[in-house]
Amino acid sequence: MTSTSHPTFLKAHQFIGLQPGPRLIVLGAVHGNERCGTQAIEQLLNELEAGSFAIERGMLTLVPVTNPLAYQRRTRQGDRNLNRNLRVSAHPVDFEGQIANVLCPLLDAHDVLLDLHSFQAPGQPFVMAGPSNNTSNLEPFAHSVEETRLIAHLGPRRVVEGWMEAYARGVARRREARTEAAAGLLDTDYGIGSTEYMRSRGGYGATLECGQHDDPESVNTAYRALRQALALLGLASLTLKPPRSDFEVLRLVDVIDREHENDRFVQQWKSFDAVEEGQNIGLRHDGTPVTVNKAGFIVFPNAATPVGNEWFYFAQASERVIQ
């Protein structure tokens, strides 16, 4: 395969225990420049092949590189973001669409998903959680208890919820304003990534943001979480460490778009920087300040995002209890 060719397959490693149990799938490199999950999965694979421990119950599927084109290029995406609008398509128009047609049936065959990611700026690891049990049209869910228990054992202290609600709020605002956003940003379903898809199919899962891209500790975070998941689900006879007791849970409550190429932040924000009520976050091109009406936290700020796309998310403390 040359460096410019498109990969033609998705590689997965599967271990099926002789005793019944849950079916767990673990993804690495859904984004090609987020490689800590790949390295952690490879470390676990080496231990399984060497007989350091064994899968005894249920099924474990490991996908070290979920987006091989982006991984080959060392970029976040190949043709588009694989972790948006994840669905089966009769006529895929890009590489990620082809991957989705293979990945979605693979997810369908499992009960639990652990998706391993990393991020660009310095910061502590965190977990993206799904909603509480509900029967709404946006993201109905029935496995909040099981998912919360999984999250509690993965390791990181910080948990972030509310993704789909905040995304839907942004979609509604763009439609009302009739902004010239990218087509996907006007579709609530475009917010569906791996874990959202898994929940929509009757399973549950967690997205683990393991740390900064090239920080060796992010690999350790991913590796420890992998072993904890195997122990919690009973797939292998590994020691389950107790959950921590100092969780910080934040809820995404809004998303603010960049409306003009000259919109700018007033400082270089990092995810989870705290902000006060009325604090100036940025300036629109005409000098109008962009403020927040309550104290909270800046999440996923992107100073270079294209016009019409998400500029930053805003989060506040949640009353949700992780235990």
Image: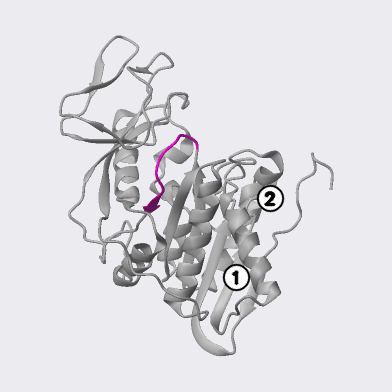
Label 1 environment density (alpha carbons within 10 Å; few <14, some 14–19, many ≥20): many
- Quadrant housing the C terminus: bottom left
Q: Which residue is found at the position 50% from the left and 45% from the top?
A: 118
Judging depth in this view, the residue of 81 and 71 nearest the camera is: 71
Residue ID for mark 2: 68
Range covered by the magenta-colored residues? 120-127
240 horizontally vs 237: left or right: left
Q: Which amino acid does label 2 sit on?
A: Pro
Residue 160 covered by magenta stretch: no
Q: Which residue is found at the position 54% from the left and 90% from the top?
A: 19
Judging depth in this view, the residue of 189 and 31 nearest the camera is: 31
What residue occupies the far top of the structure in this picture?
286
Residue ID for mark 1: 61
Magenta region's main secondary structure? Answer: loop
Q: Which residue is found at the position 64% from the left and 50% from the top?
A: 67
Can you say whether 276 is above or below 104 in the image? above
- Residues at marks 1 and 2, CA–CA distance in whole angstroms: 17 Å
User: Where does residue 271 sit, x and y in percent of width and height?
Assistant: 36, 36
Label 2: element kind: helix
Can you say whether 223 is above or below 14 in the image? above
112 horizontally vs 96: left or right: left
Counting residues from the start of the chain, the first of labels 1 and 2 encountered is 1
Can you say whether 292 is above or below 127 in the image? above
Label 2 environment density (alpha carbons within 10 Å; few <14, some 14–19, many ≥20): many
